[in-house]
Every structure is written in structure tokens, then in C-alpha cells.
Image (cartoon, rainbow, N blue to C red):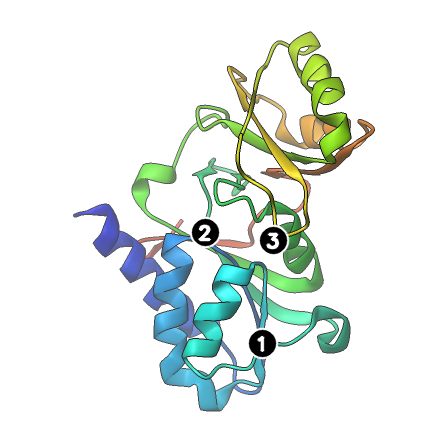
Amino acid sequence: MSNTSEKRQAAEAALRYVEDGAIIGVGTGSTVAFFIDALADLKNRIQGAVSSSEQSSAQLRQHGIPVLDLNAAGPLSIYIDGADECDGHKRLIKGGGAALTREKIVAAAAQKFVCIIDSSKRVDLLGKFPLPIEVIPMARSLIGREIVRRGGQPVWRDGVTTDNGNWIIDVHGWQITDPVAMETELNQLAGVVTVGLFARRPADVVLVGSHEM
């Protein structure tokens, strides 16, 4: 089965978690784009969506789905998003699309996090996909040195500015055996905005194609 058909199947399977009258948290990326297309058929059953990126907001509006502000929406019943990697404990690496900060905020506001992926994203150990870290621009070199001290290879994602006006460092060469501890440690570095590890708050449900993991 192709990755594209698995992504579409996962996106459509996620619709069963959408409740009438809900405000849906919506992530970013190619699999989420399929979910937004599918959500359009249910738009009269939901209040609207809180989006993690300008890209997803634009797609939601194209379908006539109201895009709501998280401060006004309050707690969300559900958040739907993809991932770049997912281990057997539903811990994730996210941020390939540079929306990791808003994704983590919306995930934290949701009672249930449903992650939709294709089988290529399943791994035993996180870290083959370079770990994105969003940083305040003036801290890029400082954080790069801290990454090197920890055995990683930092690569600045040159030419990319996040929706928040920050930069991304992609860390190569890490095998992340304790993602919760690493997420906690990296969060303490001055200048780090968000780490692309979703381990302290992993997904609650992972759909790989049409199958729940």
C-alpha cells in the first residue's frame, strides 16, 4: 500500500473521534491535509477548529470551517495531527513542517491527541528523523554548541522562519533512548522555544492507516 493511501486512510479513520458540537484541534502536514478535506463533510456538525499553522488555517477556511482562537475556545476535546516518527509508546518526533510550537500548545489544550501516520513513520527508537528544535534567533549558535556537547549534529534550517518568527535547528545523529528526559533537559536551555519531542505528553491514539496501533 502506498504512503499516500495509508495517509488518506488514517485521516478518514480519525473522523470517528470527532464528536458533534466539538471544537477540533488541527495540526499541520500532508496527512492532516487529507483530514481537513475529510472534515469538510462534517463541518455543519462541529463548532470549528483551532489550527496549529497558517497553512492549515487557510485550508480550513477554504472549506468553510471556522478557524477559532485557542484563547477564546478554551479546552479542546480532541487534537488531530501527524508525526515524523512514532515509537511503540506513542511518543513522537514532530516539526518537519516547522509548526512544532503551536502543535505542542494545541496538543496540550486537548483532552485526547489522535496521531495519524503511515507505516513508514513507525520506529523502534526515535532519532533517525532529525529532531527539530525551534529557537530564538539570537540563541542559534549557543544552542548549537549545547547540542554538540550532547553528541548531536546541529543543522540550521536556513531560509525557514516559523509562524512565530523563530528559527529551526535540526539535530542529526541522536538515538533517543529516553525521550521524556531529553525533552525535559532541552526545554531548560536558554533560547529554546520548543523541542520537537512529544514524549512528556505523547499521543493517546495512533492510527497507522486505518488500524489503531
The residues bearing labels 2 and 3 have C-alpha atoms spaced at a distance of 10 Å
Residue at the spot 69% in from the left edge and 73% down from the top edge: 69
**Of tags 3 and 1, which is closer to the observer?**
1
The quarter of the picture where residue 139 lies is: top right
Question: Which mark is first along the chain, 2 or 1?
Answer: 1
- Between 4 and 90, the one lying in front of the other is 4
Mark with earlier residue (2, 3): 2
Tally of numbered tags: 3
Q: Residues within 10 Å of mark 3 (few under 14, many from 20)?
A: many
Residue picked out by circle 1: 67
Indicate which disc residue 103 carries: 3
Pinpoint residue 132: horizontal percent, then vertical percent.
57, 33
Residue at 40%, 49% (x, y): give it. 213
- Secondary structure category for the residue under label 2: loop
Asked if residue 210 can be seen in this view, the reply is: no
Depicted 39 relative to depicted 130: above or below: below
Question: Looking at this rendering, what residue extends furthest in the front direction?
Answer: 159
Foreground: 63 or 165?
165
Give the labeled residue for mark 2: 82
Between tags 1 and 2, which lies in front? 1
Query: Where does the image place residue 186, in percent across and percent down from the top left?
Result: 73, 27
Confirm whether residue 116 shows in the render: yes
Q: Three-letter amino acid code at disc 1?
A: Val
Q: Earlier in the sequence, mark 3 or mark 1?
A: 1
Q: In what element is the residue under mark 1?
A: loop
Specify whether 95 is left or right of 195: left
